[in-house]
Amino acid sequence: MDRHDLLAIGEVAQRSGVSVPTVRFYEEKGLLVSVRTAGNQRRFERHVLRRIAVVRAGQRFGLTLAEIRDALEALPPDRAPTKRDWSRMSRRWHDLLTERIEAMTRVRDGLSSCIGCGCLSLRSCPVYNADDVLSSEGPGARRLPPAAREG
């Protein structure tokens, strides 16, 4: 690899539209990989820009950094991914995103009247937790799918 094919962290941040601390954070979380120069400066291969774009898209879709990292592990770490590599990675998200879309649709459709009117009727509310029976299942909003609770 030619040293001219490597980008400094500031250039990665500027070209990807994220801050330098964000690039460092993504690297710390295993989303990006850098190499070090003799002076111990981070350098990134150009294809890291595409990885950052995927991380940002995944975050906008509501995926956790762990879910994004798991998907990125399907990509080759030592070269720019091919179209086939990207397709394989995107299949990992398909079912997960479909499940989330369906869950959000159920929440939207089931709570729209409650959110709209604020009546909080204990007789007709779909999320009412009589006698706190859901507390035995643990903390948090128990009627949400597990992935939505983990955030």
Image: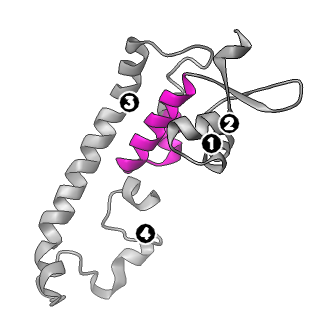
Of badges 4 and 1, nearer the viewer stands 1
Cα–Cα gap, marks 4 and 1: 37 Å
Crowd rating for badge 1 (residues with CA inside 10 Å; few <14, some 14–19, many 20+): many
Cα–Cα gap, marks 3 and 1: 24 Å
Residue under label 2, please give it.
9
**Kind of residue at disc 2:** Ile
Q: What element carries label 4?
A: helix
Dots 4, 3 in contact, CB < 8 A: no
Dots 1, 2 in contact, CB < 8 A: yes
In this view, the residue in front, 9 or 51, is 9
Residue under label 3, please give it.
92
Looking at the rendering, in which quadrant would you find the N terminus?
Answer: top right
In this view, the residue in front, 74 or 46, is 46
**Kind of residue at disc 4:** Glu
Residue found at x 12% / y 86%: 117
Q: Give the range drawn in magenta.
A: 47-70
Residue under label 1, please give it.
23
Cα–Cα gap, marks 2 and 4: 45 Å
Residue found at x 55% / y 17%: 76
Residue under label 4, please give it.
137
Cα–Cα gap, marks 3 and 2: 29 Å
